[in-house]
Structures are given as C-alpha cells and as structure tokens.
Image (cartoon, rainbow, N blue to C red):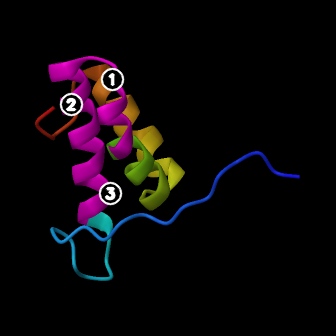
Amino acid sequence: MCDQEFRTLRFDPRFPNQNQTNACYMNYCDYYRCRRLLGDVDDCKIFKRYFETICPNFWIEHFDELRERGAFPGRI
C-alpha cells in the first residue's frame, strides 16, 4: 500500500499552453520569493509542489546551483 497522495495540479491561467517551460521557471522563482518574504510557511509550498511536478530534475538542480553561486537570473 502506498502512503503517498497523488493529486493533479490545478489549471494555471497564466500558462494556458501545452509548453510548461515558463510555468516551471515562474513557479521556481515564486517559491523562493515567497520564502524570502514570508519565511518557511505552508502557503509557499504550493509553488514548490508545482515546480517539482513540472520541471525536469536536472533543471531544478541547475537552478539550485545558480542560486547558491548568486548567479540565478531570476528575481527572487
């Protein structure tokens, strides 16, 4: 038996197209911007769930490396 709950993501009207590259990037930025402004609260975790679902893992790793080096191009 699996203890993990699976749910689909809600429709985001900001990204109506099939290509979800921009949604991946924006949700990643929104998560870290939310954490910077509000701290580690549950309200920010929705963005993390979205980008972890949409983004390929190697993109997330690359974004994390850029953030750690202070070279991430997004506004966080």
The crowding category of the residue bearing disc 1, from other C-alpha atoms within 10 Å (few below 14, some 14 to 19, many at least 20), is: few
Q: In the rendered structure, which segment of residues is drawn in magenta?
A: 22-46
Q: CA distance from mark 2 to mark 3?
A: 15 Å
Q: Which residue is mark 2?
A: 34
Q: Nearer the viewer, mark 3 or mark 1?
A: 1
Residue 41's label in the rendered image is 1
Q: Within 10 angstroms of label 2, few (less than 14), some, or many (20 or more) residues? A: some
Amino acid type indicated by mark 1: Val
Q: Nearer the viewer, mark 2 or mark 3?
A: 2
Q: Amino acid at mark 3?
A: Cys
Would residue 18 appear left or right of 54 to someone viewing this image? left
Farthest residue toward the bottom?
A: 18
Residue closest to the far left: 75
The residue indicated by pointer 3 is 24
Say whether disc 1 or disc 2 marks the residue closer to the N-terminus.
2
Horizontal and vertical percent position of residue 17: 25, 82
Cβ atoms at labels 1 and 2 below 8 Å apart: yes
Between disc 1 and disc 2, the foreground one is 1
Where does the image place residue 75, in percent across and percent down from the top left? 10, 36
Please tell me whether the stretch drawn in magenta is mainly helix, strand or loop: helix
Secondary structure found at label 2: helix
Among numbered discs 2 and 3, the one appearing first in the sequence: 3
| Residue 18 lies in the magenta stretch | no
Which residue corresponds to the image point at 22% horizontal and 41% vertical from the top-left? 29
Picture quadrant where residue 34 is located:
top left
Q: Quadrant of the C terminus?
A: top left
In this view, the residue in front, 43 or 76, is 43
> As shown in the figure, which amino acid type bears the numbered disc 2?
Cys
Work out whether residue 45 or residue 69 is closer to the camera in this orientation and state it. Answer: 45
